[in-house]
Amino acid sequence: MLEKILCVDDDPITLMLCKKVIKKSDFSQEIDSANNGEEALKYFDNLIIENVNQANNFPQLIFLDLNMPIMNGWEFLDIFSKNEYLENFYKTKVIVLSSTIDPNDIKKSKDYPMVIEFLSKPITSEILEILKNIIK
């Protein structure tokens, strides 16, 4: 079981569903959320200020939507893959959770070393069971 997960999605229903499925499957003890990439970056900036070195202070996994207003998933990944974030959150992995079926998006996601999987929405308990074996 992971200590903490961050779900980043602009759709409140998707966020609610994601939280319910994660809680039900005992995949993570704590689930935080952000409505877009900008909120997610502010979340991580606050963790840096609060002292990220505390073991359970940062999420081990991010479920990231791609198509969001203000700052989309690609923009978030571009910034999150820069040194300031990589140095502090090198253990945090990303799973793109998107409704897109564009093969170019899947291919592009592999350009980011922190992205370990590209999944279609919605998240299910079956998918989480598979992920438990991938994320250790």
Image: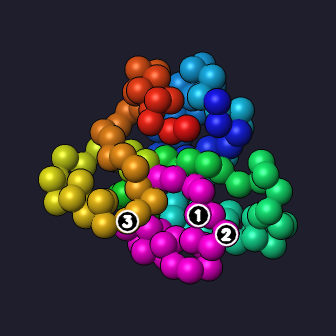
Region of the chain picked out in magenta, as a range: 74-94
User: Is residue 67 or residue 95 the one in the foreground?
Assistant: 95
- Distance of label 1 from label 3 (alpha carbons): 12 Å
Callout 1 amino acid = Tyr
Residue type, numbered disc 3: Tyr
Q: Provide the residue designation for mark 3.
A: 112
Q: Secondary structure at mark 2?
A: helix
Q: Earlier in the sequence, mark 2 or mark 3?
A: 2
Residue drawn at x 55%, y 38% as measured from the top left: 136
Residue on which disc 1 sits: 90
Q: Quadrant of residue 23?
A: top right
User: What x and y, as percent, mark residue 1?
Assistant: 64, 30
Residue 37 screen position, x and y as percent: 51, 65
What kind of residue is marked 2? Asn
Residue drawn at point x = 30 percent, y = 39 percent: 120
Q: Which residue is mark 2?
A: 88
Q: Are marks 1 and 2 in contact (CB under 8 Å)?
A: yes
